Image (cartoon, rainbow, N blue to C red):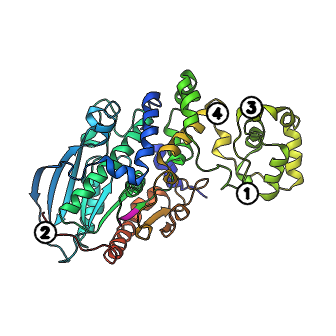
Amino acid sequence: MSVSRLDRIYRSLLLSTFFTKGWGNPENILKLFEFRKEISNRERCVKLVSEDYPITIINQRTWNDCRILEGKFFSPLAIHLPDIVSPEVTEAYFQIIIPKKWKSKTYRPMCIHFAGTGDHYFWRRRNVMAKPLLKSGIAALLLENPFYGLRKPKDQYRSSLHNVSDIFVMGGCLILESLVLLRWCEKMGFGPLGVSGLSMGGHMASLAATNWPKPLVLVPCLSWSTASLVFTEGVMSDAINWDLLQHQYFSDSKFHDTLAKCCTIVDDPFEFCRVQDYSLECLSEMLTNKALTPYEVLNLIKTSGSKCAAYSSKEAAESKKALISSISNSRLMNLIKDQQFAFSKISRYSNMKRRDREAVWFMRGIMDECTHLKNFSVPFDTSLVIAICARSDGYVPREGCSKLEDLWPGSTVRYLDSGHVGAYIWHRQVFRDAIIEAFEKAKTICPPPSSASL
């Protein structure tokens, strides 16, 4: 897959860096791992939030074409994990945009729009998505991201989250907060209900949708099945201090002895990629570190895309070390030449500094553990899922991880001939059209809502 040049240029112009303080407290990460098992199961997750969870409307005003309501409530995650959710994040703020007059006398569609990276406060989503959709009779609810806008810690610079664990706190907050808001919207007489978002917002919308026990519109835009490749393969990986993460990983045994054993890379990185994607150095490392025999490597070369052997234990790797070391780089090169394969593409993995690779693999493992959709329930009705992706997305790579249509049979995935940034600039109408289409379909599935209270 080619990567958009615009994505690379745009990222290079940004000065923000991520995870400047490292991984976060390992004890907190372990608690988040355990809590992920609760919120990833729909039957258990819905019980974590009471049916009559309190919400306060703090402001109302009328504009020319709509009504604006603003509200807040205490994030449920701060109740379940009070030691992990920082004080600035505990209060959830939202804004609702409602048409003065509904187009339908029967339905009052409401879509929750989740914020993408850098989308602070409400103005961007309100103007880019909410107000244009208002013309089609779809109301909007804009939820402020944890660590953003009104919920941003005072010592945090813009969108630069301090710790890797902050991403998991953000996701946990949004999953439970969406449950609060969806139930509230139901009681207020809105419906059908839906969720959407762009980039990170699209993935957060996907996570939120897995735990709603009824049909729900879901339109994730410019996201995919896991956030792991965003930070290890995408252009955003260049904004991470891997030396710091590597140092912390080996400085505290809780990372490499405990946490590393609690998380699993969901997708075999070699299952979805052709052998041409790997350099000689990378293949040699597979022999040394992944306990592949020379015959397994040759089989990979011959089949050009077959699944490599599964990761094996350190003991298994050591037991094969003698056999593996018997093949030198020059001999392996001759074997490759004999098979007439040209290794023209060099993967980012093979170019990564050797001392940082443990941090990269650990990042992929913990991101998969907490963000991979395979670890969460399948949405209640996948026919209401329309995902929009960019073919040349440099921010959200797709090669090497599960396809949405495989994880969620019945869902629709559409592709734009664009990169991530270009899709946001030139194809926003495609996102809005997909939302309108999904809500029209939902009207044929969902019963009309009860009488409106707003």
Q: In terms of depth relative to the viewer, which is nearer, 284 or 226?
A: 226
- Inspect the image, locate mark 2, and give the three-letter code of the amino acid beneath it: Lys
Instruction: Residue at 76% x, 43% y: name it.
Output: 283
CA distance for labels 3 and 1: 27 Å
Circle 2 crowding by C-alpha within 10 Å: few under 14, some 14–19, many from 20? some
- Inspect the image, locate mark 4, and give the three-letter code of the amino acid beneath it: Lys
Please give the label number shown on residue 412. Answer: none
145 shown above or below 79: below
Residue matched to label 1: 305
Residue matched to label 3: 315
Residue 275 appears in the picture as rendered: yes
Q: Quadrant of residue 303?
A: bottom right
Of labels 4 and 1, earlier in sequence is 1
From the viewer's perspective, tell me whether residue 415 is left or right of residue 347. left
Circle 3 crowding by C-alpha within 10 Å: few under 14, some 14–19, many from 20? few
Q: Quadrant of the C terminus?
A: bottom left
From the viewer's perspective, tell me whether residue 99 is left or right of residue 443. left
CA distance for labels 2 and 3: 68 Å
387 shown above or below 298: below
Instruction: Residue at 57% x, 46% y: name it.
Output: 233
Circle 1 crowding by C-alpha within 10 Å: few under 14, some 14–19, many from 20? some
Q: Secondary structure at mark 4?
A: loop
Is the residue under label 1 in contact with that under label 4 (CB below 8 Å)? no
- Inspect the image, locate mark 1, and give the three-letter code of the amino acid beneath it: Gly
Residue matched to label 4: 353
- Inspect the image, locate mark 3, and give the three-letter code of the amino acid beneath it: Glu
Of labels 2 and 3, earlier in sequence is 2
Q: Is residue 274 magenta?
A: no
Q: In terms of depth relative to the viewer, which is nearer, 337 or 196?
A: 196
Q: Which residues are magenta?
A: 215-219
Tell us which disc is closer to us: 4 or 2: 2
Residue 278, how many percent across, how many down?
Answer: 72, 48
